[in-house]
Structures are given as structure tokens and as C-alpha cells.
């Protein structure tokens, strides 16, 4: 059996410490093993969204970056991002819930960022009320239009935001 495995997987009988990564690197750099991903950033008009978008635009694994928000400030961020010469294409969606659902469709990763309306000095209850409805709507759309996407929640307070998204997914038969 061991001989068959060595032949099948070309296992070297040398100890593990002498294993060279060049053979693994050969398989990982082939084009058929590389997959590009699409990322949707909800709340991309904020400073945090802008900085995150700049970093993600430079990642070679990201093929499309969808920036979505209900305000009209988002196209300015996309214009700045598209000046960089990378393979990642940036698209913006703003306005109604229909536009946000278009941004979410086909995304592999959805990043939900907070709005800048909340001051850190704002009491916890007010912050939850300000961000809660928006977060609930985003989570509901994520379960409907991108059920297999990885959802990253970065809306403070995290201890309230993550359970809210989790319960929203279970309510809508995730």
C-alpha cells in the first residue's frame, strides 16, 4: 500500500525536515489553481471603507470590488480606486435597496462597515438603534441574494451586531 501511495503522490522517503517547498510552489502558481474572488463592501463611503478598498484593490486575488451605500458619495471613491493599474475592477452601487442587492449578488465576501453617524461618545443604546436597522436590512439582503457568501461584520458594538446578523439569517431560512 505504501508503495502505491508513493507512486501515486510521488512521496519522497526522506524525512519531513528535508522537504522542499519548490514542488508545492510549482502547483500553487499554476493558473488553474488560482481563483479570483469578488468582494462587496457595504459602507464603502466612510473613511474605513475607503482605506479598506484601497488595500483590497491591490490584492491580486480580488477580481471585482463592489462598493455600495445609500449615499451618492461612493462614486468619488471608485474614481480614485480605478486610477490604480490593477486587475481588480471597482463598481459602485448607491441608492435604493435594489442597487445594494445588485452589489451583493455574486459576491464571495461581503464586508459590512459602520456609518460615520455614530460618535464613540454616543451611548450604547443609541448606537444600536442607529446601526441596527441598517444592519438588519443588509443581513436580510445577504441571505436572499448571496446565501453562500462569507459575511464580515465590522459594526460596533460587535457583541450586538454579530448575533443580530446571525438571528437574521436564521429567520430567513439560511
Image (cartoon, rainbow, N blue to C red):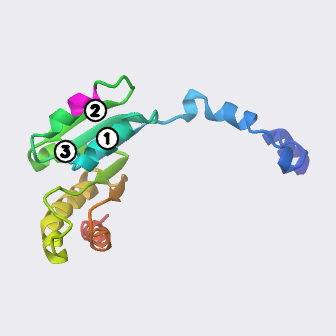
Nearest to the observer: residue 69 or residue 46: 46
Label 1 Cα crowd, 10 Å radius (few <14 / some 14-19 / many 20+): many
**Magenta residues, as a range?**
78-82
State left or right for residue 3 relative to residue 174: right
- The CA span between labels 3 and 2 is 13 Å
Q: Are marks 3 and 2 in contact (CB under 8 Å)?
A: no
Q: Residue at x 9, y 40 (%)?
A: 72
Q: Residue at x 71, y 37 (%)?
A: 24
Instruction: Name the residue that disc number 2 marks.
Output: 90
Q: Residue at x 53, y 34 (%)?
A: 34
Q: Position of residue 158 (x, y in %)?
A: 31, 69
Instruction: Name the residue that disc number 1 marks.
Output: 53
Residue found farthest to the front: 121
Label 3 Cα crowd, 10 Å radius (few <14 / some 14-19 / many 20+): many
**In the depicted structure, whether residue 100 falls above or below residue 164:** above
Nearest to the observer: residue 76 or residue 90: 76
Q: Position of residue 1 (x, y in %)?
A: 88, 51
Return the disc, 1 or 3, that comes first in the chain's sequence.
Answer: 3
**In the depicted structure, whether residue 116 falls above or below residue 47:** below
Q: Quadrant of the C terminus?
A: bottom left
State left or right for residue 5 relative to residue 58: right
- Can you tell which of label 2 and label 1 is closer to the viewer? 1
Return the disc, 3 or 2, that comes first in the chain's sequence.
Answer: 3
Residue 45: assigned label: 3
Amino acid at each position: 500500500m505504501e508503495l502505491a501511495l508513493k507512486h501515486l503522490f510521488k512521496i519522497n522517503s526522506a524525512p519531513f525536515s528535508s522537504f522542499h517547498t519548490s514542488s508545492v510552489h510549482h502547483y500553487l502558481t499554476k493558473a488553474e489553481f488560482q481563483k479570483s474572488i469578488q468582494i462587496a463592501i457595504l459602507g464603502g463611503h466612510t473613511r474605513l471603507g475607503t482605506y479598506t478598498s484601497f488595500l483590497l484593490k491591490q490584492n491580486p486575488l480580488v477580481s471585482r470590488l463592489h462598493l455600495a451605500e445609500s449615499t451618492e458619495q461612493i462614486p468619488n471613491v471608485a474614481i480614485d480606486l480605478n486610477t490604480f493599474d490593477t486587475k481588480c475592477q471597482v463598481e459602485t452601487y448607491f441608492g435604493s435597496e435594489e442597487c445594494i442587492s445588485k452589489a451583493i449578488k455574486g459576491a464571495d465576501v461581503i464586508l459590512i462597515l459602520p456609518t460615520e453617524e455614530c460618535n464613540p461618545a454616543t451611548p450604547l443604546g443609541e448606537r444600536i438603534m442607529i446601526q441596527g436597522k441598517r444592519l438588519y436590512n443588509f443581513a436580510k439582503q445577504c441571505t436572499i441574494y448571496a446565501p453562500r457568501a462569507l459575511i464580515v461584520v465590522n459594526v460596533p458594538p460587535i457583541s450586538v451586531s454579530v448575533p443580530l446578523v446571525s438571528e437574521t439569517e436564521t429567520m430567513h431560512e439560511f
